[in-house]
Amino acid sequence: MTNNTGRAWIFASDISTDLIFPGRYVHLLSNMPELVKHTLEDARSDYAGAVQPGDFVVAGDNFGMGSSREQAPVIIKLSGARAVLAKSFARIFFRNAINVGLPAIEVNTDGINEGDQLSIDFGSGRLTDHTNGIERRFEPLPPIMTEILADGGLVEHIKKHGDFHL
Amino acid sequence: MPMTLVEKIIAAKVGHEVCPGQLVMVPVDQVFAHDLSGPLAISQLKALGFSGFKHPEKVRFFLDHASPSSTVASANEQKTIRDFALQSGVELIDVGEGISHQVVMERYAKPGEIIIGGDSHTCTGGAVAALATGVGSTDVAIAMYLCRTWLKVPETMRFVIKGQLPRGVYSKDVMLHIVGKIGAGGATYRSMEFVGSAIDSWGLPDRAVLPNMAVEAGGKCGLCPSDAKTKEYLTAQGRPQDYSPLAGDNNAPCQFEMTVDAATLEPQIALPHTVDRVVGVTDKLARGIKVHQIYLGTCTNGRIEDFRIISNILKGHKIAKGTRLVATPASRRVYLEGLKEGVWTSIIEAGGLVNSPGCGACPGIQTGILGSGENCLSTMNRNFKGRMGNPEAFIYLASPATCAASALTGVITDPREVL
């Protein structure tokens, strides 16, 4: 294992932003240190308290469906997750994730199990499951998203270039 | 070359033909945020070193989710937005005016525009043939700042809706049927274009349900043509000058086509906890389910046309014991029209309650949070676990008529029995 590896936290398909950031915590909208304690709470109540920096959120299809609340990817990032890996994403969540600097990677997640040790190479588009030896390739992000992510999010991207760098 | 409606809108903005998958920079005609997406948008603008808007006339803030404020935190978030709007000289649409999407449709959206909103149901603007799409706070902030955004030209899914709606069946049933067929991710990244003889015959309030719920299938946008019905609607809203005809080409290639014969449908119900778990109202999974709360309103079905249907069913009757009914008009205009027509009287005399215009109970932060183990039947657009504030509750979705009929019996009821 390298220090580049992290644990897989397995989630189902159709994880809504209501499950990631429940509306009942909307009073914490601008209080990230508190809100992050409830990350993904209604999908898995054991995640927020035990996730370690560098771990991975691993899901099925349509991750992040529903509302546009950007705090959803923000708190996943702040919870320590290195990336969200899913078979597919809801588009607003996908865009928000890149904008806040959370890698959202579309990749076949079948066969990855709870607790597996994963590592990822964003540049070459390769995901490795060290626990069961699976290796998966994924399509790199569109160039504009790669740039936004590399710049640390959309605000940093605009600050650096003064505009979208398409 | 023939083009779908979304391709036509984007091509007109960028000045050249476009094809699905292409990344383009587009000018933004209108951009807005609300009390949940606004605070982060404002802090992102400040992080950019914001010193003023180039086009303040394109920027708006709505206070609609907590309308009026429900906690000290929401009151302070709203104060932040009010102060910022005042300082930066942009329009603030304050609490009580209504849900952003309804107000945008009534007052602002024009055919062919590109509208960016910090809310997933921004796609409602497609009812007037505007490419309206929801994004997060940072994208909204940048769109406010630059009056531009990037987007990927979406593939088009064409839905041909034909046939006359049978008694007790409404556009909501058609859309629930479609989402049930294609699934909660069935239109992801795509434009849903609604055409056909049924669409041609519906007024804008009925049409709006379809683009409103495009995001429930993952769609980037939902679009209806701009035609005589659009002209009629914009004229009734006092802005006939904003009308222009616009439609996709029927022979434009699209990536998917589905025909729905509305005449064959029965009232539909979406079961907890995803919008694509759709059955007919007569299905054993729906019919007879105990309903503790009926919630009427939202950007999907909170218009005067919806409340007229509800009022006609409730008038002179009482809501079932053990069931409560909460109604929330989608805008001040709807509220006022309802007052003149007496629809609130019917609802209140039947035992229901009427709240001030806004999102109401839908986002789960106020005025109608559910108890554990309770079932809610609602005209809203999504039924995710926890949506109405309690992950231990269950949300079913239906048309206004099905909701009103069920209010009288206390269980999910086929509206054709009372119409």
Image: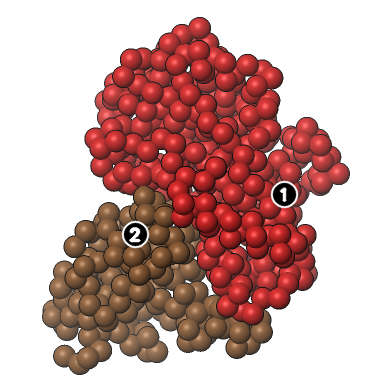
Write down the residue under mark 1: B109
- The structure residue drawn at horizontal position 71% and vertical position 59%, both measured from the top left corner, is B86
- The structure residue drawn at horizontal position 49% and vertical position 58%, both measured from the top left corner, is A68
Which of the numbered marks, if any, corresponds to residue B290?
none
User: Residue B277 location, x and y as percent?
Assistant: 34, 41
Neighbourhood count class around disc 2 (C-alpha, 10 Å): few under 14, some 14–19, many 20 upward? many
Q: Which of the 4 image quadrants contains residue B27?
A: bottom right
Q: Colour of chain A?
A: brown
**Residue B150 visible:** no
Write down the residue under mark 2: A20
Q: Secondary structure at mark 1?
A: loop
Q: Which of the 4 image quadrants contains residue A55?
A: bottom left
User: Residue A13 location, x and y as percent?
Assistant: 30, 57
Q: Secondary structure at mark 2?
A: helix
The residue lying toward the viewer, choosing from B326 and B85, is: B85
Q: Chain of mark 2?
A: A
Q: Is residue A103 left or right of residue A45?
A: right
The kind of residue tagged 2 is: Ile
Which residue is most to the top? B316
Neighbourhood count class around disc 1 (C-alpha, 10 Å): few under 14, some 14–19, many 20 upward? many
Q: Is residue A144 left or right of residue B204?
A: left
Q: Nearer the viewer, mark 1 or mark 2?
A: 2
Q: Is residue B251 left or right of residue B392?
A: right
